[in-house]
Image: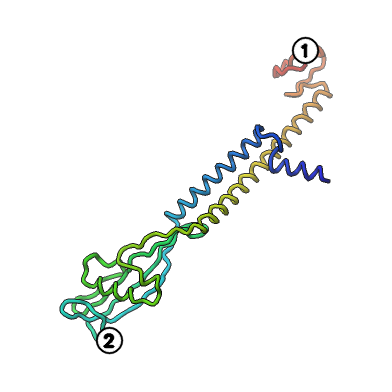
Amino acid sequence: MAGRLGYLARFIFGPVGQPKSTWARVSDLALLGTLVLALFMQWYGSEYICRHALLADGQENIGRIDGEYVLAGNGSGIGSVTWELRRRECGWPYFVTAALDPIRANWVIDGEGSSGSMDVVPGGHPIGPLIQRIVSNHSNPVVSKAGLSPGPTAVYWTSLIFGTALCWLGLFLAVRAIMVFSRAGFLLQRRYTGSMEARRSMQGRCPSCGYNLDGLDFAASCPECGALLW
């Protein structure tokens, strides 16, 4: 029983004590190749697989004093401003980088109309300082650090390490399974070919092509395919 288990382990994980064998070299290449691919997947995920998670939003009435926008009480003022803050989180299977998006807002002012859809506040716009003050006074300390420009990118090293390890393990197991089945197919094909050649030899035929060799007992090669007979 132990011998069979040992053979199965050597078959799946490679020949033990034979570091120069083709199987061992392919295994090493698969180990290195899947690591490189896992690192590439983490880089690609951190750049292109992203979501923008909503952190906070709100709506305020606004007024204007001496050309400067200020907060106004309910039912008063010259319009309203609606804002939202999102965080850009990137990575797969776990997000490994995160950064605060610029504050996005739209507003409606009497006599001036609407600013349109929710978007980044244009630089230098007079309503920008008011929106910045509103967000800076938010109770959430993460939200209060947001600004009208993108925040710094934070790297979550624990997620990066675990994500890379998980991808590496999955890729290596997939490649390893392909290698094991390929090796099993090769061994079965070789065993089948060997048994077929032995059977043909016993029947007096060419082991390679099956040509009938009756009367050709002393022929050095097969007259059909040219294979050496002895």
Q: For this rendering, which residue is in front, 152 or 13?
A: 152
- Along the horizontal axis of the image, is 179 left or right of 95? right
**Against 134, is 183 above or below?**
above
Q: For residue 57, what is the image quadrant?
A: bottom left
- In this orientation, does residue 192 appear? yes
State the residue lying farthest toward the top: 218
Q: Secondary structure at mark 1?
A: loop
In the rendered image, the quadrant that contains the C terminus is: top right
Picture coordinates of residue 68, whole percent (x, y): 19, 76
- Along the horizontal axis of the image, is 135 left or right of 97? left
For label 2, the crowd category at 10 Å Cα-Cα, with few meaning under 14, some 14 to 19 and many 20 or more, is few
The disc labelled 2 sits on which kind of residue?
Gly
Query: Reading the chain from its start, which is encountered first: label 1 or label 2?
Result: 2
Q: For this rendering, which residue is in front, 155 or 34?
A: 155
Residue at image coords 71%, 40% = 184
**Against 197, is 107 above or below?**
below
Q: For residue 145, what is the image quadrant?
A: bottom left
Circle number at residue 219? 1
Residue at image coords 57%, 54% = 166
The disc labelled 1 sits on which kind of residue?
Ala
Picture coordinates of residue 109, whole percent (x, y): 22, 78
Q: For this rendering, which residue is in front, 129 or 205?
A: 129
**Against 82, is 188 above or below?**
above
What residue would you read off at disc 2?
73
Image depth: mark 1 or mark 2 in front:
2
Residue at image coords 42%, 61% = 98
Q: For residue 6, what is the image quadrant?
A: top right
- In this orientation, does residue 50 appear? no
